[in-house]
Image: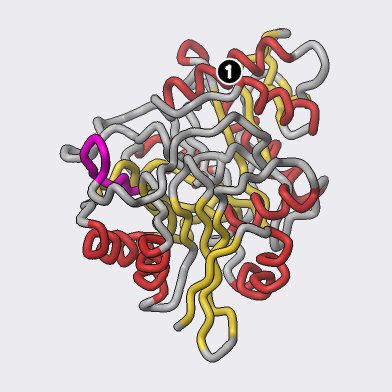
């Protein structure tokens, strides 16, 4: 098994395209980000690492690390996550953690601890849902509309509140939501002329579009606004952007969000998680490359920034023993939490 790390997204995509198409759900975060880089909708960094795994010359896996975010892992053949962990440690990389499908993150984390002495703790447990037959909620007052010029203040307000509630501690780029506004990615649900909920959707990668973020202010929850606007953007992901599949992530600690998305037609596909590595002030290995935050830059699709998950009003406390999310978590990229 051979693992290579490279910084060129075009060369990476040329070799990884077949694998990304075979894993359209678990590799969606990687596919969306690389597509955005190649289309000029996002800016890369010399610190980015795109990973290829080969067996007998054939690409059998891929991964991505774009500091300051987590390593992102799709479904991989057994042994590949451990090989990637060893290659990253040898290259002197120092990710804050790892996120992706559970089978891959657990193997990577175990190998990373052996290589570096850094144990990991699960910060978020998630589930990816795939849209089946869409059922729009009935009787929800109001109507959807695409956010546009004049909505900058409300979408910025909703985005800030979303980040503070669903992804506490994560660096917030106010310009990101405005770029998504300009791209036509965001929709508002209005009731009696007031914006009461917001949802976004991203461009498809390998035929898969991801929904997020979804946000409803606390005083407007429980009235179906979040479900209604999510159903609306889910339909448009298919009809307007040509997605063969539409997906979203939820927080497994929140029964409410998992139930409301299933009610409009989403079905579970796989479980994922985010793990943060535990290290001292200078880290377990001083030679490892720092993943200190860099300047904010454009992100693709839903949010990168991520694989945080969609999350509605919390119906029960987080499991004991889980730590607060790391400021360097991967979101947007993928997964995006969703108070609704």
Query: As rendered, which of 286 and 19 lies closer to the eye?
Result: 286
Identify the residue shown where x is 55% and y is 46%. 334
Farthest front residue in view:
287
Does 76 appear above or below 304? below
Does 156 appear above or below 290? above
Which image quadrant for residue 6? bottom right
Identify the residue shown where x is 51% and y is 86%. 55
Does 267 appear above or below 43? below
Q: Which residue is mark 1?
A: 158
Q: Position of residue 220 (x, y in %)?
A: 52, 14
Which image quadrant for residue 254? top left
Q: The N terminus appears in which quarter of the rendering?
A: bottom left
Residue 259 visible in image:
no
Q: Position of residue 208 (x, y in %)?
A: 67, 57
Category of crowding for the residue at label 1, using alpha-carbon neighbours closer than 10 angstroms: few (below 14), some (14–19), many (at least 20): many
Q: Position of residue 80 (x, y in %)?
A: 41, 74
The residue stretch that appears in magenta: 275-283
The mark tally for this picture is 1
Q: Is residue 282 magenta?
A: yes
- Is 134 on the left-hand or right-hand side of 1? right
SS type, badge 1: helix
- Dominant SS of magenta comes to loop
Q: Is residue 191 magenta?
A: no
Identify the residue shown where x is 39% and y is 41%. 251
Identify the residue shown where x is 71% and y is 27%. 187
- Is 67 on the left-hand or right-hand side of 104? right
Query: As rendered, which of 48 and 303 lies closer to the eye?
Result: 48
- Is 39 on the left-hand or right-hand side of 303? right
């Amino acid at each position: 098994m051979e693992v290579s790390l490279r910084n060129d997204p075009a060369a990476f995509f040329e070799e990884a395209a077949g694998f990304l198409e075979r894993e359209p759900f678990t590799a969606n975060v990687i596919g969306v980000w690389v597509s955005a880089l190649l289309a000029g909708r996002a800016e890369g960094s010399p610190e980015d690492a795109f990973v290829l795994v080969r067996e007998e010359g054939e690409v059998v896996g891929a991964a991505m690390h774009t500091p300051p975010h987590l390593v992102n892992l799709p479904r991989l053949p057994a042994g590949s996550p451990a090989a990637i962990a060893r290659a990253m440690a040898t290259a002197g990389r120092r990710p804050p953690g790892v996120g992706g499908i559970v089978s891959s993150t657990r193997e990577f984390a175990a190998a990373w601890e052996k290589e570096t002495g850094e144990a990991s703790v699960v910060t978020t447990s998630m589930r990816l849902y795939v849209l089946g037959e869409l059922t729009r909620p009935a009787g929800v007052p109001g109507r959807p509309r695409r956010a546009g010029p004049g909505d900058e203040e409300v979408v910025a307000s909703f985005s800030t509140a979303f980040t503070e509630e669903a992804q506490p501690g994560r660096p917030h780029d106010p310009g990101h939501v405005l770029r998504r506004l300009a791209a036509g990615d965001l929709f508002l649900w209005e009731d009696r002329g007031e914006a009461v909920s917001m949802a976004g959707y991203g461009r498809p990668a390998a035929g898969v579009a991801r929904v997020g973020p979804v946000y409803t202010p606390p005083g407007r929850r429980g009235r179906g606004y979040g479900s209604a606007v999510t159903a609306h953007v889910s339909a448009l992901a298919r009809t307007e952007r040509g997605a063969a599949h539409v997906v979203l992530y939820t927080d497994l600690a929140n029964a409410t969000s998992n139930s409301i998305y299933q009610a409009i037609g989403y079905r579970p596909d796989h479980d994922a998680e985010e793990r943060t590595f535990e290290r001292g002030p200078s880290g377990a290995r001083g030679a490892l490359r720092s993943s200190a935050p860099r300047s904010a830059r454009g992100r693709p699709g839903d949010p990168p920034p991520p694989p945080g998950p969609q999350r509605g009003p919390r119906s029960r406390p987080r499991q004991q023993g889980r730590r607060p999310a790391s400021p360097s978590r991967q979101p947007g990229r993928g997964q995006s939490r969703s108070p609704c």
